Amino acid sequence: MVLSLVIFLPLFGALFILAAPSLEEKRIKWVALAVTILDFLVSLPLWFRYDGDSGVLFQLGQSAEWIPSLGIRYEVALDGISLLLVLLVTFIMPLVVVGSVKTITRRHREFYTLLLALQTFMLGAFAARDLFLFYMFWELMVVPMFLIIGIWGGKPRIYAALKFFIYTLFGSLPMLVAVLYLYTKLKAQAAADPSIEAAYSLDALSSLTLTLKEQWLCFIAFGLSFAVKVPMFPFHTWLPDAHTEAPTPGSVVLAGVLLKMGGYGFLRFAIPFFPLAVQQAVPALYFFAVVGIVYAALVALVQTDVKRLVAYSSVSHMGLIVLGIFALNPDGVRGGVYQMLAHGLTTGGLFLLVGMLYERRHTREFSEFGGVAHRMPVYAFFFLAITLGSIGMPGLNGFVGEFLIFLGTFRESPVTAFIAVTGVILGAWYMLTTVKKIFFGEIRNDANRSLVDIDRREIAVLAPLLLMIIIMGVMPAPFLNKMEASVQAVVQGYMTAVGR
């Protein structure tokens, strides 16, 4: 029951906001904050109740009949990977609400309703153990984000929102066809063998026998959807526009959580269900991941807009995560999952920081800044610290994930690992150059002389992020231990299926 409460509590909050028309606009944000904080507090016991050494992979679950005639159940549970991602969602969302106080100045009721509904859909997708239920949450996530970008975004927001919607729809429709095909195939096998249950449950689908051709077709359908969401090169072009035009809270949710859905989908569905196709696709996946890492880093180097630079850095980092996942050994997969968490914190933090600067200067062009550290020393400290986490400074969270990814990738393909390292070097170059251009030197633009440093509300948003960045950098063991059994299950299941 606790997991279901964590999933649906934000949706209840959204419905309350809608059902209380007398609720003043200025109080709506406080209701949203209370709901997200409560959801985080309710989710915390999941960390302590999940026992990775119990021998039971999926725990804390709940299962009930939903549409039995169609084989659809409400079935949710957590393993070590989904547990960490659920906690990432509940940790980030209160910070998003606090960070939106000055950014969102109109239609508060609609915005916070959409934001809370989006939280439920993200949590549901991470926890779903029924393929149809997962697909439902997966598709529902698109609507709130589309509206958040389209209503509260920048001037070209309609273009960015439509591009996001079209790309996502393009990726999701083939997956729907594949989902229905898998169920139809399982139903046919169940008719011949009464011991097989015809259902969308992942446990039932694990008994499905697919030919290599069927695995390839389904992998392409699922993989396309996940590749768009990551996003992998060459399906990445929607992301810079969406990030740049989205309001700051939308960018934080997009970078902090939504992009992780693609990596999670590969781990939860593509690798376990289509291992033979994955084995043959690995060289191509390495190629697209490495091209994305290096290409996005090179494009980031020439950006003149700070937010757009962070968006391209996100594409590069997500390529690194895909590389770790498809190393398909324990170190690579551990690193991929760890980097998903690290990226959610650091890139989410960077978008918050860029938003705070934009609120003061209403521009994100590098040419408008310089010497900002003289006027905003506390802001400069947080920006530098979170940037160091993003580029993988030892002692901060980004280092752990990157180290494990390269360790795992080097064992499978030293050449691929060597090329990917250039993306990390370029990443350090453009991020440190960003810090130099914004904060150091003399104040050249008189508008920057009136800048005011961040206040207590903004520090309250950034401090928890920085604290977690440090904790994950110096004490990675608790997080790695939680995911270990799940990582081993993914890798061993794949190895067994391909005969390695």
Image: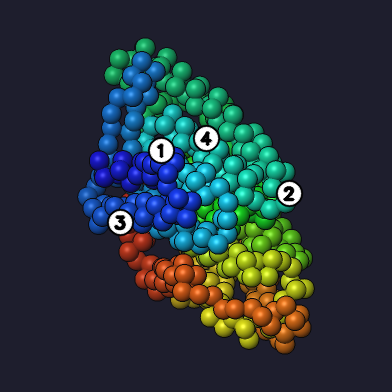
Disc 2 vs disc 3: which is toward the camera?
2
Q: Amino acid at mark 4?
A: Glu
In the image shown, does 329 or 395 lie closer to the viewer?
A: 395
Do the residues under discs 4 and 1 have CB atoms within 8 angstroms?
A: no
**How far apart, in angstroms, are the residues tagged by discs 3 and 1?**
24 Å
Mark 3: give few (<14), some (14-19) or many (20+) Cα within 10 Å.
some
In the image shown, does 272 or 163 lie closer to the viewer?
A: 163
Residue 221 spot, x, y in % from top left: 58, 32
| Lateral position of residue 429 relative to residue 181, left or right | right
Residue carrying label 4: 139
> Looking at the rendering, which quadrant does residue 429 occupy?
bottom right
**How far apart, in angstroms, are the residues tagged by discs 4 and 1?**
25 Å
> What residue is shown at x 68% (from left), y 73% (from top)?
434
Do the residues under discs 2 and 4 have CB atoms within 8 angstroms?
A: no
Q: Amino acid at mark 3?
A: Leu
Disc sitting over residue 156 in the figure: 2
Disc sitting over residue 19 in the figure: 1
Mark 4: give few (<14), some (14-19) or many (20+) Cα within 10 Å.
some
Mark 1: give few (<14), some (14-19) or many (20+) Cα within 10 Å.
few
**How far apart, in angstroms, are the residues tagged by discs 3 and 4?**
27 Å
**How far apart, in angstroms, are the residues tagged by discs 2 and 3?**
38 Å
